[in-house]
Image: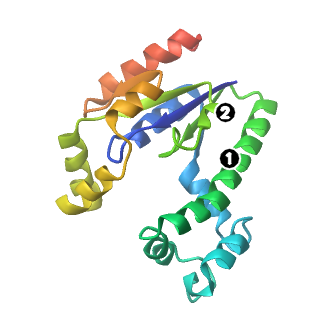
Amino acid sequence: MKIIGITGGIGAGKSAVLDYLKERYGAYIIQADQVGHALMEPKGSCFLPVVKLLGKETLDTQGKIDRGKIAALVFPNPQLLAQLNEIIHPAVKQEIREHIAAQDQEGRSIFVIEAALLIEDHYEEICQEFWYIYAEEAVRRRRLKEQRGYSEEKITDIFQNQQTEDVFRRECSYVVENNGDLQMTYLQIDKRMKSYGFM
């Protein structure tokens, strides 16, 4: 089974790439963020450790973890953020490994992991290669304004906290340019998939 890691800055259009890999090649898609959210649900393995770390004031009226409250607590506090990550990230990786094992048993040929912190969290332990989904800054800004209603200030703040293009290009073995012409994006994906033997 081919295991591909997909990353890139916010607004680069990673979802379009994931959708195409799923529809065209039958890839099994897993997104690390969504796995993390599920693990923080009341029955998830991270729920109690997170509440123990951050306190019951992080719960909403239904007894669920309020991610907004958590963000407000941890982002100004790097030490607390690191402690939270030590709970979440290994658990997410373990969950992904279990999905990989299950899909491999079922005979799936392509497994795709999308993670913002693919490089930082050392997903090379799991993936055979990384793809960097690239879009020009102006394109990303326009998408974030139109699709999410973000302000220029919010976008700039997010960009400053994300990995640089140089690092993405250095660490990833394939770059997909996704500036708006989806047919061109699909051609680049097809070219790489063909090199693996998928037609």
Quarter in which the N terminus is drawn: top right
Coordinates of residue 155 in the picture (x, y in percent): 25, 56
Contact check, label 2 and label 1, Cβ < 8 Å: yes
The amino acid sitting under disc 1 is: Lys
> Which residue position is annotated with label 1?
93
Q: Is residue 95 above or below residue 111?
A: below
The amino acid sitting under disc 2 is: Glu
Q: How is the image coloured?
A: rainbow
Q: Between residues 143 and 80, which one lies in front from this camera angle?
A: 80
N-terminal-most mark, 2 or 1: 1
Q: Quadrant of residue 198?
A: top right
Q: Secondary structure at mark 1?
A: helix
Q: Is residue 119 left or right of residue 160?
A: right
> Which residue position is annotated with label 2?
125
Question: Hey, which residue is sitting farthest front in the picture?
Answer: 79
Question: Hey, which residue is sitting farthest right in the picture?
Answer: 105
- Give the residue at x 69% y 78%: 52
Q: Is residue 140 left or right of residue 98?
A: left
Coordinates of residue 136 in the picture (x, y in percent): 23, 35
Q: Is residue 74 above or below residue 89?
A: below
Q: Between residues 9 and 104, which one lies in front from this camera angle?
A: 9
Coordinates of residue 94 in the picture (x, y in percent): 73, 48
- Give the residue at x 20% y 62%: 153
